[in-house]
Image (spheres, rainbow, N blue to C red):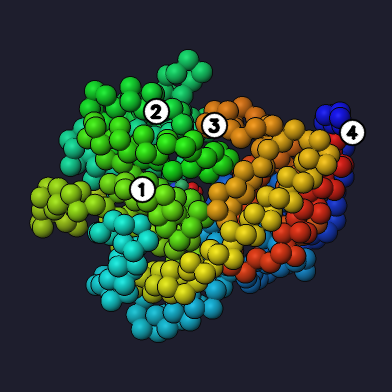
Amino acid sequence: MIAVPILDRSRLAALMAREQADFVARHPRAQALHERAQRSLLAGVPMNWMVKWAGAFPLYVEDASGAHFRDVDGHDYIDFCLGDTGAMAGHGAGPTIAAVERQLRRGITTMLPTEDAIWAGEELTRRFGLPYWQFTITATDANRFSLRLARMITDRPFIAVHDHNYHGTVDETFAWLTPDGRVESRRGNLGPQVDPATTTRVVPFNDLGALDRALADQKVAALLIEPALTNVGIVLPDPGYLEGVREITRRYGTVLIHDETHTICAGPGGVTGAGGYAPDMLVIGKTIGGGIPAATYGMSAEVAERITAGTSLEDADVNGIGGTLAGYALSLAAIRATLGEVLTAEAFARMIPLAERWEAGVNDVLVRHAVPWHVTRLGARAEYHFMPTRPRNGAEQWANGDFELERFLHLWAMNRGILMTPFHNMALMSPATTDADVDRHTEVFEAAVQAVFR
Ligand SMILES: Cc1ncc(COP(=O)(O)O)c(C=O)c1O
């Protein structure tokens, strides 16, 4: 039997310093841009989370195409981050570009519907089963509006979410469980307007007993969930979990909302379509516009009826649900082309085997080097965890996180032409990704494992 290898922290620190020096040496133009950016952008980045990339400064992108991009210093990268799903359709997919170019010349926004909206509604129904749809610019907005509507139709004060969820910057969802089971504001929650414990109940993933207890007093308007966690790391539902969630929410009259923004990687209809689930509402954003801002929320006929009964024509413009560009023509043209011609069932039939190849490659490295880590896959997305078995809930995955190691692995990959999602160890396949891209990752990952363990 091979002995479990040892992770040597001082060696890791030395390797990180060497990789950081290489990164700086290889990116003089990005460094110059970063220095210039300090004078006009807070922390030198256009959005705060961009400080989190593992390099000494962010890469600056020259252009992106398919599953690759080039930085301003002339290096090519295989993109397994894909804009954290925004570019899951591949960079610059031909049909999306053509539709967007056409729409740019025909009117970007008029605050009136175009026929593309009807096409999109019909296609979303075909994929996810729900009959009625509304459009927004971001998945965050789609989640916020769904929660508002659920509160309105149930007249209940609370919402519920999974521990270690992420559903965008939706204030009420920024809550987690303390080790003794209390709800508190999650770490990093900037300037919350109220204590989330006053709005939100939190339940561990894969724990039907806890869900039952959280909903039993019938004060919870909506349960907003990813049907598999993806944002703390991939956590898959146990067999029967999602069926149990449906049964409990139905019993207590809580509106069940599936957020498929990331879990669309499971197939053309996400986890919901693949499993034949029937949530009351469903949200999806990011990828459906092929990179053009676009998101949507759908609802059952019963939810739609209750919403219609509770809304007034006179207040329709100032009722807390909106956005000037929500449902605008450019976004709908992008959705039509992306869902109709790019992220098709045939595309998933190519992407999922690529993720299987990625998973098998990583797993083979782990087995051959006796590394006690685990690899999980959800359709076209896969991820390795720093623990020997799959996590069953968000807290377990969180407890096995290793920020220092993660940053090293990301930087190591970046210096060798591979971009991973900057949060945990996740890789996403696009229709343009190739076997060679995947095999290059396996090779680079194996070299990292060999460097870091002794
Ligand atoms: C599951 C899920 N829902 C919603 C969002 C929010 O998307 P956006 O930031 O585009 O509003 C995210 C973002 O990562 C997400 O992962």
**Of callouts 4 and 3, which one flags the residue occurring earlier in the amino acid sequence?**
3
Q: Which mark, residue 454?
A: 4
Residue 349: percent from left, percent from top = 55, 64
Return the residue at label 2.
208
Marks 1 and 3, how far apart in space? 21 Å
Q: Amino acid at mark 1?
A: Tyr
Marks 4 and 3, how far apart in space? 29 Å
**Of callouts 2 and 4, which one flags the residue occurring earlier in the amino acid sequence?**
2
Marks 2 and 3, how far apart in space? 13 Å
| Secondary structure under the numbered disc 4 in the rendered image | loop
Residue density around tag 1, few if under 14, some if 14–19, many if 20 or more, within 10 Å: some
Question: Which quadrant: the N terminus?
Answer: top right
Which residue lies at the image location 47% right of the left edge and 75% below the top edge? 341
Against 215, residue 338 (above or below) is below
> Can see residue 10?
no
Which residue lies at the image location 24% right of the left edge and 31% below the top edge? 252
Mark 2 in CB contact with mark 1 (< 8 angstroms): no
Return the residue at label 3.
392
Q: Amino acid at mark 3?
A: Arg
Mark 4 in CB contact with mark 3 (< 8 angstroms): no
Q: Amino acid at mark 2?
A: Leu
Return the residue at label 1.
277
Q: Is residue 78 left or right of residue 283?
A: right
Q: Is residue 292 left or right of residue 299?
A: right
